[in-house]
Image: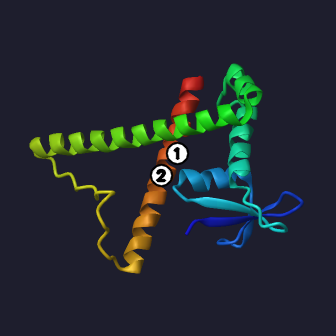
Amino acid sequence: MGYVIKRYSNRKLYDTQESRYVTLEELEELIRAGKEISVVDVSSGEDLTSVTLAQIILEKERNHRTTLPTAFLHQLIKHGEVWQDFVQKSFRSSLESIITSQREADRVFREWASRAGWAVPHAPDVDAKPKPEKPNEAETLKDEVAALREQLRALEERLEKRRDR
């Protein structure tokens, strides 16, 4: 189950799993760490997940950490839902293609590494049913993956800082 975030009328965000208030930046970090979040309005029960995710993206835009082309934003507003549906379908298709390419690249790399005599552990097949694991083992693996993602994020930040110099 993903993280359920409650949004109060004062715009505060409350992480029900961690029992604490969180910021948009912390939600971004959760997502980067592979967590699924859902944001729900406390009073109405309305799903505010997409609005909150858009808010995170726009906050990054405001801080100039990313750039969305102005022409793209104009078209998005101008053509309304039709354009938004098109963009959403395009993004979904692109993401699926990227994931497929990553899986294929991983397969090719593993094949090449095994031919070179390197001991490369086999990645689990996403479509295959996972073997039952001990609960502690699964949590340990999740923690290790989260730690590796955090290290990768830190390295990406360092690289970005060096590029800015």
Pointer 2: what residue?
Answer: 149
Please name the colour scheme applied to the rendered image.
rainbow
- Taking depth in this image into account, of 110 and 71 the one nearest to the observer is 71
- Taking depth in this image into account, of 11 and 128 the one nearest to the observer is 128
Q: Residue at x 37, y 74 (%)?
A: 137
Pointer 1: what residue?
Answer: 153
Q: Amino acid at mark 1?
A: Arg
- Per the image, label 2 sits on a secondary structure element best described as helix
Task: Name the side, left or right, on which 153 lies relative to 28.
Answer: left
- Taking depth in this image into account, of 67 and 29 the one nearest to the observer is 67
Q: Residue at x 68, y 40 (%)?
A: 57
Q: Which mark is residue 21?
A: none
- Per the image, label 1 sits on a secondary structure element best described as helix
The image quarter in which residue 128 lies: bottom left
Q: Residue at x 10, y 46 (%)?
A: 117
Task: Name the side, left or right, on which 133 lies relative to 160.
Answer: left
